[in-house]
Image: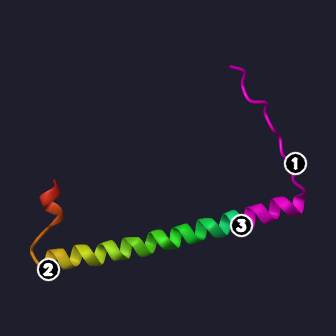
């Protein structure tokens, strides 16, 4: 099999800035969503601990 030919894309400076800004926004959103998920997990773990159904020590 022959390898796929390499494709080089050329972007103007303004296009590069726009791509970078969109990438930053996506990264920010991903970090925020990750933090929300961590908070939800903490709340669930707290409920489980209070119900004495599960503790982190049980997983060790």
* Dot label at residue 50: 2
Mark sitting on residue 22: 3
Q: How is the image coloured?
A: rainbow
Query: In this rendering, would 34 be left or right of 49?
Result: right
- Say left or right for 42 vs 33: left
Left or right: 10 in relation to 1: right
Task: Depth check: give the residue in front, 60 or 37.
Answer: 37
Q: Residue furthest front?
A: 1
Given residues 23 and 4, the one toward you in this image is 4
Q: Residues within 10 Å of mark 3 (few under 14, many from 20)?
A: few
Question: What is the x, y in percent for residue 15?
Answer: 85, 61
Q: Marks 1 and 3: CB-CB under 8 Å?
A: no
Q: Which of pointers 1 and 3 lies earlier in the amino acid sequence?
A: 1
x and y, in percent, of residue 44 in the image: 26, 75
Q: Earlier in the sequence, mark 2 or mark 3?
A: 3
The quadrant where residue 6 appears: top right
Picture disc at residue 10 = 1
The residues bearing labels 2 and 3 have C-alpha atoms spaced at a distance of 42 Å
Give the residues in magenta: 1-21
Residue 39 point in image, percent of width and height: 36, 76
Under circle 2, the secondary element is helix
Mark 1 vs mark 2, foreground winner is: 1
Q: How many marks?
A: 3
**Looking at the rendering, which quadrant does residue 50 occupy?**
bottom left
Q: Residue at x 76, y 61 (%)?
A: 19
- Please tell me the numbered disc located at residue 56: none
Residue 16: x, y in percent?
82, 59
Q: Is residue 11 above or below residue 31?
A: above
Q: Residue at x 72, y 21 (%)?
A: 2
């Amino acid at each position: 099999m022959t390898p796929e030919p390499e494709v080089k894309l050329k972007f103007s400076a303004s296009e590069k800035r726009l791509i970078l800004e969109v990438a930053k926004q996506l990264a920010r959103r991903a970090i925020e969503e990750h933090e929300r998920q961590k908070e939800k997990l903490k709340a669930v773990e707290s409920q489980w601990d209070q119900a004495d159904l599960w503790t982190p020590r049980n997983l060790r």
